[in-house]
Image (tube, coloured by chain):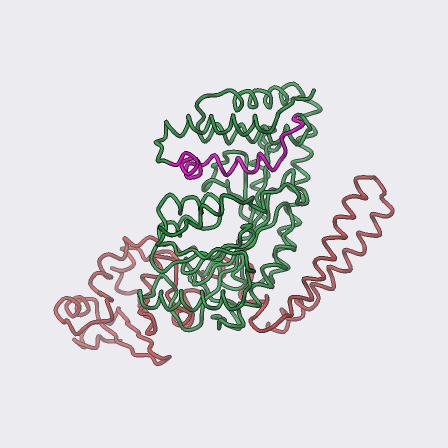
Chain colours: A red, B green
Amino acid sequence: MLCDICNKHEATIHIQEVINSKKKAMHLCSECAVKKSQNDPSFDFGGFNLAEMLYNISESQSGFPGLSPISENETLDESKETEYLKCGNCQWTLKTLRRTGRVGCPECYNVFREAIDNALENMHRGKLHVGKKPGSKSTDKSSNFMLKLMKLQKKLDELVQREEYEKAAEIRDKINSLKKKINAPKAKKKNASK
Amino acid sequence: MPLNKIDKLLEHDVSWLLDSGPDGDIAISSRIRLARNIQSLPFPIAATAGQLEQIQTAAELALKKSKVIGKEYLDIHMSDYSELDRQILLERRLISSEFVEKKEHTSLFVKQDESCAIMINEEDHIRIQALCPGLQLFKVWEQINKLDLELEKSLPYAYDSQLGYLTSCPTNVGTGMRASVMLHLPGLVLSERINAAIQGVSKLGLAVRGIFGEGTDNRGNLFQVSNQSTLGESETHIIDRLSTVITQLVMHEKNCRLSLLKNKKHFLLDHIGRSYGLLRHAYTLSSEEALNSLSDIRIGVDMGMFNSIDLHTVNKLFMTINPAHLQKFAQKELNSQERDIFRAAFVRKQLKNAKHSQGE
């Protein structure tokens, strides 16, 4: 793809702005991008200073596990296409995300989904929320299950301490069947999502 | 001058430091916090002053209307209080160190017995925490869940069907829940098994840290074990997993204490006795010295060495010997040297009041 301005060089900077889920894209070569950001005040992406981004990006410390900051070599590597995104709702940029490890608003999760997805995989045990949701009391049931489980566990510990192993084995079986019941619906959900 | 609400907190006992909880000899307290945000408003890190004010007003209104934290609560605007007062809240574990520095448009709602606290405009719009003494995360979950259900009736939460509760930091997304238990593990430390235990727990995807700082700082032999992952597992599943691991740790600790008593009895008794002597008779006491000696006293109490000192007294001292509390009691600013002198006098008095009598 050629640069939108000079139409000569290969475009290596791709700016994409998302406003109300609509994308606006611009493709520039690094030379034109720097010139434009330095000379043209109308080239304003809400405090999104391209020159600063091109030259200082290696200073940004990643506060975001799994999302390493772009190194200087990478920004100079013109063959590599790097995409810079900005959230139209709160003006948060990918650079700020990398520097702070935080997103700016709920909408950022859509805008930066690709970058965040990779990081989420490293941070968490799954990629899909399976806990409570607003307006539902579904967890009450499993919380009762859990209370029962805790009580049984306590009883088991006491029995083991008193060396009453036969009774302990009964309780252990009860615990195991209860645990199966709790995990069963979740296992189904996991399979369904695959 | 308006009534200092923070002074009022100091008049009451902290409910989660009582020694009535299950496994209270080793597990001091169980804590859960939930991160919640209001739909379509930017997170505090990206919000304008106007938006922060909007969030603060909405959250305060919802809290007052829903009566979720009962009648006996204090609402504290952080900007009304001095640095020292804010440090007091930090030492009482009611706010985060980040919150101490954030004064504008931030508030704290806290139940009088400190079993529940809500920070407004910390990293997320709302951070709710609930605490109980001992190891009882399910009881804490029941309490905090009730509160959350009540609050969501008046606040539209930012929620995504795939990612769950949306939070400013992606490490909290999903349940928005961090559950943790504060453990006193001197047995594992004295028998040099603590590093193996920490490594074991880390491999299970749980985090272990010292209470007073990051990393290897284990003053007072106090540790906090918490979940790291918040996405892909339900709240109860996380709590179950955490509780199982902590029950194991508690058992290890008990075994270490027993084996020390069996194989190194004189070493252990001498260790505890010397610490008691230090706390009863020293005239300057650094914070580190005090915490480590208190840790020794705490095992002594558990072993029945001290008839009239109870765990509650020691638990409270772990909190009140910190700099902000001491300066509050002294009613003046103290430099580090003055604090050490005041701390020694304070601890001597507290232990004397406990009418000590040392058993065999």
Give residue A6's quadrant in the image.
bottom left
Range of the magenta residues? Answer: B306-331
Horizontal side of residue B20 vs B214, given as left or right: right
Report the residue at 77% width, 52% height from top.
A152
Could you tell me which residue is drawn at 71 percent across and 66 percent down? A184
Q: Nearer the viewer, residue A37 or B155?
A: B155
* Depth order, front residue of B63/B292: B63
Asked whether B35 falls inside the magenta stretch, the response is: no
Nearest to the observer: residue B131 or residue A87? B131
Q: Position of residue B301 (x, y in %)?
A: 64, 30
Type of secondary structure dominating the magenta stretch? helix
The number of callouts visible is: 0
- Measuring 29% from the left and 58% from the top, which residue is drawn there? A74
- Residue pushed farthest right? A166
Asked whether residue B205 is in view, the answer is no
Q: Is residue B240 above or below residue B26?
A: below
From the viewer's perspective, tell me whether residue B135 is left or right of residue A153.
left
Point out residue B141 in the picture as x, y percentages from the top left corner.
61, 58
Where is B12 relative to B219, above or below?
below
In the rendered view of the protein, which quadrant contains the N terminus of chain A?
Answer: bottom left
Can the viewer see residue B15 in this picture?
yes
Residue A109 image position (x, y, % from top left): 42, 69
Residue B265 lies in quadrant: top right
B272 relative to A109, above or below? above
Left or right of A136 in this view: B83: left
Residue located at (55% from left, 71% from top): A134
Of residues B78 and B41, which is closer to you in this image?
B78
Q: Position of residue B182 (x, y in %)?
A: 57, 44
- Extreme-left residue of the structure: A39
Image quadrant in which the C terminus of chain A is located: bottom right
